[in-house]
Amino acid sequence: RTIRLKDYKKPDYTIKKTDLTIQIFENYTQVESTLHMHKNPEVVGFPVLQLNGIDQQIQQIQLDELVLTESDYQYEDELLTVQPGKDEFVFKSITHIKPNENTSLEGLYQSGTMICSQCEAEGFRKITFYLDRPDVMSVFTTRIEADAKQYPILLSNGNPVEQGELAGGRHFATWHDPFPKPSYLFAAVAGDLVRHDDVFVTQSGREVSLRIFAEAHNAHKTDFALDSLKRSMAWDEKRYGREYDLDIFMIVASDFFNMGAMENKGLNIFNSAAVLASPETSSDDRFDRIEAIVAHEYFHNWSGNRVTCRDWFQLTLKEGLTVYRDSQFTADTHNATVKRISDVDMLKAAQFSEDAGPNAHPIQPQEYVEINNFYTATVYEKGAEVIGMIHTILGEALFRQGTDLYFETFDGQAATTDDFIGCMEKVSGHDFTQFKRWYVQAGTPNVAVEESFDANAGQYKLTFTQSCRPTPNQPEKRPFVIPVKMALLSEQGKELPISCDGDFNSDTSVLLLKEATTVVTFSGLNAKPVASLFRDFSAPVTVDMALSDQDQMTLATKDSNAFNRTNALQSVFVEVIRKLNADIDSAIPESVDELIKATLGDGSLVDAVKAQMITLPSFAVLRTMFSPINAQALAFAREKLKRHIAVTFAEQWQQLANSLASAQPYEFNAAEAGRRALHGTAISYWVSSGQVEAINFAEALYRAAENQSDRLNGLQAVLSSDDQERSEKLLTHYYRQWKDDTQMVETWLALNAGQKSFDVAQANALMAHEAFDLTNPNKVRSVLGAFASNFEAFHAGEVGNYQFIAEQIVKLDQVNPQVAARFTKVLESWRVFTEDRGVPMKQALEMIVSTDGLSPDVSELAMNALK
Ligand code: ARG
Ligand code: ZN
């Protein structure tokens, strides 16, 4: 069943007030729901009322005072149909559900010792009958009853209003959320949880009580999230004028969770891996990620909750905007360049590949079968890029006026992406009609740039030609509006004044491209400048520009925009890898050595950026640049370049490995994390040079480490070496030491599956290990996810890997369709690989598709991949 945006219709009925009583018993949960319903006044007659409901064991259905008999209602195809025949009525249902059998982790389910919920997008219908769509907003009152010993903590959205004891050792708590919300923002939790408290005083002086809850084994790791939360709250006040609205804000950590976290009103529920941190067990990357996710979920309180989405085609309205906001928060908190480089890296790796594949979709998809399949890098990360382009075009002041207007105008409403753009147009007078193509056209545009210089006239001409390859159902693309943030540089890297005939804004340094071809002439130049284009990655496009070696060197060593400088340097690496990929014996140009030397010796660069600059592009990024991909050739090519750099600069790596070591207590901040990043990079190169002292150094670092960043810097270097025995010894040691720590065990599984030599036999052994659990998404991702993204083992290894992953997808689909579906992406790029890989990848997909009883999640993606 395909759902289409063009078929959107307002609901016939709305639910003004929702009263729930959730009674948790040993083997089932009873949900009593009382819905105060109104007919939409625009609707004539009395249409039937159809409520969503999945796996509901009906105990009683009631309309006002009338208890319905089975012939008065119909329950099939996940819909309950009744005939109210009134404008205003109360619908009441009593149903039973089974949280302890719910392995989909959607709806109400058991996670370890607690019961918790996940409703977005359409999980609420697994809890009770409802109009489970985001444009139905209701005021919820929720009473939870459970055994007082087993579940001393009972939580739901909003403010606590009542609690007390009940007969038989049971107790209850009632919560009331005064803000009308759609069902996807509902949450309920019952558990034996440890609580950590803090307080935040808002800018208007209101006291908000902050609470983080975790099971006992996780409870010692909540400090950092609490601190991140307070900083997020302060930042949103300052940067967007958004203040928190309830008296209490809660976070619950859950070991079983399908994604990162969920922004339920006043009661965020997090994957414990995305919230629990300690220096001993969390690396800098993990601290970064936790801080960003805490911020992300908190920012949703305005961009998502106060202003929500009319329907799921508007998903990017809240996700693109909120990702953009959390990336600004991280940039403001730490280092904007570092954040931009890593975001763009991730966009290229995850989103460019989506855009190039059989499941390509615009940030606003026009149709879907399973909405869970559209929580993608495209909707999230490209969606954030689109918001970023609006910011780039308008500048900070107008952008902020636009978001202010948006939050004020649509507060309490379910809005659309057009509503958002409308606000941006209103405050700026800018016409975004053509710009909106970014919302509906899939695919990554390419911009080809040609330059010419007329020395006599002092004129420099740039010709931009944009194109975008067809994507499924979109053979033809119309030109995008592409903002090019730019500068013209002298040979010495100095920025030159710009005077041109293009649509150029000198306040923002942004040139707008609107046509298929745009020619811009820059005048007043006495030598050919070097163009620094798409600064800070001002548009999510690929760029083709043939640069002279000298211009390339200027950009890679002197561009004042550190993002572009990094990009230029990385392009040099890519070109070398391209040559080695075609011919492994081709010579590595001296420019590589010059660039590494210049970068290492540049005192103006912070450590973190240095590390990003000299780290070779990941396989995830590289593979988007090759067609066809010859997996083994690509793996050899990258390895050869890495070894070359490793050996050539072995002395420097050794020196950095020693000089960047620190015995100071762990601190998480930009400078320290940057130092450790560069330290890790140096050790990795040093070990790759093959020197025995290097691997001894790495092992010693691992053994002496008092924080997870140092530990991983040492361990990963050892694991990347050819010393199998030592690798195994350290992995065994790691597990023994940390087997009681959930997050450390997850990391251990991923470290195993990330080894170059990892194969199906080892995967099977790891999945039979006591630490593994197929019903736990984190553990599945740690093994299967790490294996599948381990390019050298998975794609450059045995072709039987494809069949293996297909079998796991089929098996996992029975347990958890949402998680299973994510893994079909591993196979969808079969067309891009050379036949030796492409054919078995395709066969693996065919095996999946021929399986009976597939979920819509897996079948939608797998079938598209074969079309
Ligand atoms: N809204 C959540 C977030 O962005 C993620 C929910 C994902 N839901 C899903 N069905 N995949 O933080
Ligand atoms: Zn989100």
Image: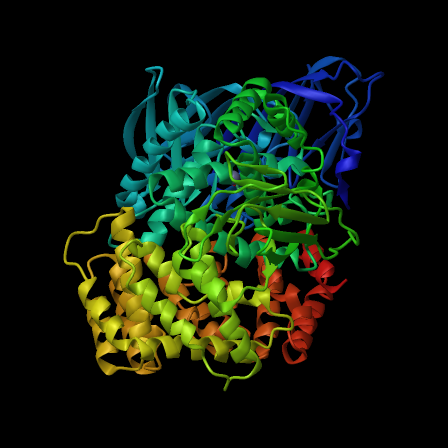
Q: Residue at x 69, y 52 (%)?
A: 856
* Residue 588: image location, x then y, percent: 45, 79
Q: Is residue 105 visible?
A: yes
* Depicted 830 relative to depicted 43: above or below: below
* Depicted 10 relative to depicted 569: above or below: above
Find the residue positioned furthest to the front.
Answer: 456
Q: Is residue 704 left or right of residue 686?
A: left
Q: Residue at x 23, y 73 (%)?
A: 654
* Residue 112: image location, x then y, percent: 41, 48
Q: Quadrant of residue 304?
A: top right
Q: Is residue 228 left or right of residue 459?
A: left
Q: Is residue 341 left or right of residue 677?
A: right
Q: Residue at x 52, y 46 (%)?
A: 486
Colour mapping used in the image: rainbow
Report the number of numbered marks. Answer: 0
164 vs 604, nearest the viewer: 604
Q: Is residue 728 visible?
A: no
